[in-house]
Image (cartoon, rainbow, N blue to C red):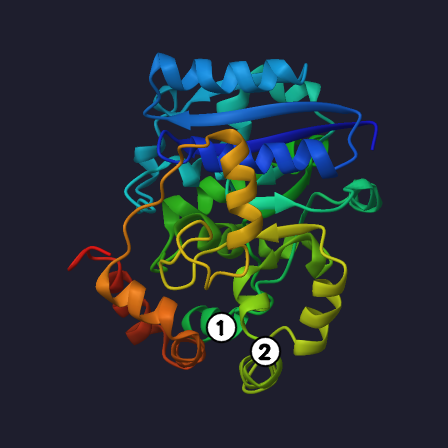
Amino acid sequence: MERLDVLYTVNNKYIDVMLASILSLIENGQVNNLRIHIIVSDFTKDDYHKIEAFLTKFNIEFYFYDIKEFNIEKYHLPEWRNTQVSNARLFFQSIMGYAIEKADNLLYLDADTLIVNSLNGLQDYSDNTINATIESMQRAHYIRTKMSPYYNSGVLYINVLKWLNENMEDKIIHYLENKTNNLVFPDQDTLNYAINEYITKLPLNYNVLAVDRFLNSFFRKIYFDTYGPNTRSNEIAEAELNPIILHSTSLFEIKAWDSPVHPDYELFTKYLNVINPEFKSDELTFWQNFFSSNPTLLKILIIAHSFTPKFIQPMARKLAVKVTKR
């Protein structure tokens, strides 16, 4: 791919994680001319300098945008993990301002993504207003939202001109001003409720979730091939054979760099050690340690979540409360 504009949103706790993602993009994306856009929250001067020093080594053009310059609170979006920065992807048009005019297509990536193969195939989707993969855990979201398809917001490929001409941000704002839905996953729910009909399906290998790879064989068939609209296990298997972007979502609050039980632990820690040899993950709680040591029980918990999300999701949050140290 000749040129690509890539957007990240990050607070100061996830700088190393984002830089690991960017390093994987540089090494494996096969993009000749990268421009990196970063919407930031709670940054110090040292935080800016750290990213600048890293990107300058690779002669990459980059831009920072501070979320505090945009009044996102007026839309009354719930915070995600105690920050509004993840919701900023919904308003990249306003936050980026004039800089957006330089981009033909914009690839949004969550900080916990790893690019493992060429992104050249994205060019086949460049004419669509917005592209995303269907959420593989769609069953749980369907029970909650009654919406199918329901898309994952961790990887978005956007035609900037069409986004502007079709007033996508205005549609999002209109939805938020009149919303009657309870937003459990604020940015992702908003994206689906507001502009679902404008989204084109990307192949699953552009956003292979950790749960897709953690559940295998018997458990995968139970989870993906029963009850209601869902991505089928054969699609997961095909994507796993030729992944392009791995999305290292947490497994009930166990992050990729926290425990070897996570399918991306080895790869993510490899990149993190390059970025920061002294990187240390958060201490696991008693229950996180328990499920890390009992992966079969963790798989059963994930499957149970797909049937009873209203009960299991709050329980997962409680697992992250530090009742004991490892």
Residue on which the image places disc 2: 229
In the rendered structure, the answer to whether residue 312 lies left or right of residue 247 reads left
Which residue appears at 28% of the width and 56% of the height?
284
Lower sequence index among marks 2 and 1 = 1
Q: Amino acid at mark 2?
A: Pro
In the rendered structure, the answer to whether residue 2 lies left or right of residue 161 reads right
* Image quarter of residue 209: bottom right
Compared to residue 273, the image places residue 141 above or below, namely below
Q: Position of residue 109 (x, y in %)?
A: 58, 41
Q: Position of residue 317 (x, y in %)?
A: 27, 61
Q: Give the crowd class for mark 2: few <14, some 14-19, many >=20 residues within 10 Å.
A: many
Answer whether residue 201 is visible to the viewer in this image. no
Q: Given contact means CB atoms under 8 Å apart, are the residues at marks 2 and 1 in contact?
A: yes
Residue on which the image places disc 1: 142
Which residue extends farthest left?
Answer: 323
Q: Amino acid at mark 1?
A: Tyr
Q: Pick whichever, 273 or 13, lies toward us.
A: 273
- The quarter in which the C terminus is drawn is bottom left
Circle 1: element type: helix
Which residue appears at 46% of the width and 51% of the height?
190
Compared to residue 284, the image places residue 102 above or below, namely above
Which residue appears at 35% of the width and 21% of the height?
43
- The quarter in which the N terminus is drawn is top right
Circle 2: element type: loop
Q: CA distance from mark 2 to mark 1?
A: 7 Å
Compared to residue 51, the image places residue 272 above or below, namely below
Which residue appears at 58% of the width and 67% of the height?
212
Q: Position of residue 83 (x, y in %)?
A: 32, 38
Which disc number belongs to residue 293? none
